[in-house]
């Protein structure tokens, strides 16, 4: 990695881009592969880059394209439910609590991964990566208003899908609303 | 700590936040970054460059990769040369006197008339197949002789491609090493060398002992200088 400017780019943004891929892909290993792919592509394209003002957004754009490609492959070839992590589990909790928490995490992750890709991308970029709607628009395409709508729709869908189990929730599911 | 519990009456987004807001642990991030740096180190193409500051042609910039010399810069400056090499190779060249010592010494001796042939590997992998064929053909033109664009096209069995040959030579990434200066127009006139640097072309031909008359030279097998 001979270029000190690119090295600085890796230092400054690799953690953030990894966190984004981790959230988007829901799989630490695949996020790590995708991170490599993103920066290797960036490395090849970097010398041809004329303007260096929007490097963060540029990296996000590459990362999103790589992630979309990986998700398409995954949709064709994989069906396993993936788990983000067990690191969040409380070591003091009882076995029963841990099982319940794990089940909740799986449910939450499955719901997030069920979102349409543009909504999932926009939600994660806004809510967890801290990008503005304008930045999201420049990264995923479309307008800032569309980004705002996607985030709103994603949240509404998740709220609807993740209603606690009760008679009402079961009734809604039977009606096909969730 | 029951951070991911979905509680009736509470916003279910709290459960989403519990899973996603914290992000990966420091250990997971560090492991991914170590893998990333190793991959970048392994992938980054190594391209080095150096300059022969005061030759008879002015400053001559040389860039080499693992497979040989891939760029020679005449009538340019350091940032311009670095940018050009970077665009072509995708790598950011690093200045290295040591790695270019051998090539720089040979080019220096050649331009001072102390050496008649250059024994330096040339890497033409970054040009199109047609341009590579043209440049390879140019390398076979003996020192001290010139041929025309049309003759070169005929040698390549593309007799109507004289203009395309001219274009391929005009974008020769390694002038001097690939002696595109030995190709001239049909009347022996020197045309198109690094844009309009005809003087450099004339100097290289004079160095090789090609008879010159102004901006014209004698073409082998023809009488008189030029037409």
Image (cartoon, coloured by chain):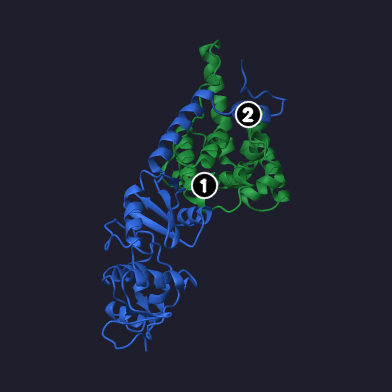
Chain colours: A green, B blue
Q: Percent x, y for residue A48?
A: 52, 54
Q: Position of B69 compared to B90: left or right?
A: left
Disc 1 marks which residue? A68
Q: Percent x, y for residue B7?
A: 67, 23
Number of callouts: 2
Q: Are marks 2 and 1 in contact (CB under 8 Å)?
A: no
Mark 1 falls on what kind of element?
Answer: helix
Q: Residue at x 46, y 28 (%)?
A: B31
**Residue B21, disc:** 2
Please check whether the numbered discs 2 and 1 fall on a single chain.
Answer: no
- Confirm whether residue A149 shows in the render: yes
As drawn, B161 above or below A151: below
Q: Position of B182 compared to A46: left or right?
A: left
Q: State the residue in front, A65 or B12.
A: A65
Q: State the residue in front, A145 or B25.
A: B25
Mark 2 falls on what kind of element?
Answer: loop
Q: Residue at x 41, y 38 (%)?
A: B41
Q: Position of B25 compared to B102: left or right?
A: right
Give the CA separation, mark 2 to mark 1.
Answer: 21 Å
Q: Percent x, y for residue B122?
A: 32, 58
């Amino acid at each position: 990695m001979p270029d000190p400017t690119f090295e600085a780019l890796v230092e400054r943004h690799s953690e953030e881009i990894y966190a984004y891929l981790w959230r988007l892909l829901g799989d630490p290993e695949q996020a790590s592969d995708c991170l490599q792919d993103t920066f290797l592509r960036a490395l090849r394209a970097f010398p041809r880059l004329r303007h260096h003002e929007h490097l963060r957004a540029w990296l996000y754009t590459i990362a999103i394209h790589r992630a979309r490609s990986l998700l398409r492959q995954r949709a064709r070839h994989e069906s396993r439910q993936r788990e983000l992590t067990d690191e969040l589990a409380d070591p003091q909790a009882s076995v029963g609590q841990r099982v319940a928490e794990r089940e909740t995490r799986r449910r939450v992750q499955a719901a997030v991964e069920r979102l349409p890709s543009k909504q999932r991308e926009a939600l994660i970029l806004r809510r967890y990566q801290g990008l503005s709607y304008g930045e999201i628009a420049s990264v995923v395409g479309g307008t800032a208003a569309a980004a705002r709508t996607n985030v709103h729709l994603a949240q509404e869908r998740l709220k609807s899908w993740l209603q606690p189990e009760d008679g009402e929730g079961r009734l809604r599911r039977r009606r096909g609303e969730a | 700590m029951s951070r991911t519990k979905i509680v009736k009456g509470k916003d279910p987004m709290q459960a989403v936040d519990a899973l996603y807001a914290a992000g990966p642990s420091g250990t997971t991030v560090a492991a991914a970054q170590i893998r990333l740096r190793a991959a970048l180190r392994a992938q980054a193409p190594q391209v080095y460059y150096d300059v022969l500051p005061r030759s008879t042609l002015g400053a001559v910039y040389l860039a080499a990769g693992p497979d040989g010399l891939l760029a020679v810069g005449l009538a340019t400056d350091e940032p311009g040369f670095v940018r050009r090499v970077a665009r072509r190779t995708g790598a950011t060249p690093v200045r290295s006197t040591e790695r270019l010592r051998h090539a720089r010494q040979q080019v220096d001796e050649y331009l001072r008339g102390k050496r008649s042939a250059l024994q330096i590997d040339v890497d033409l992998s970054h040009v199109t197949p047609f341009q590579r064929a043209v440049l390879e053909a140019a390398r076979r033109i003996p020192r001290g002789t010139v041929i025309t664009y049309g003759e070169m096209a005929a040698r390549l069995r593309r007799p109507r491609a004289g203009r395309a040959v001219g274009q391929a030579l005009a974008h020769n990434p390694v002038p001097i090493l690939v002696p595109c200066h030995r190709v001239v127009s049909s009347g022996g006139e020197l045309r198109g060398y690094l844009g309009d640097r005809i003087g450099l072309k004339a100097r290289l031909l004079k160095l090789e002992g090609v008879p010159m008359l102004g901006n014209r030279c004698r073409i082998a097998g023809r009488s008189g200088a030029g037409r």
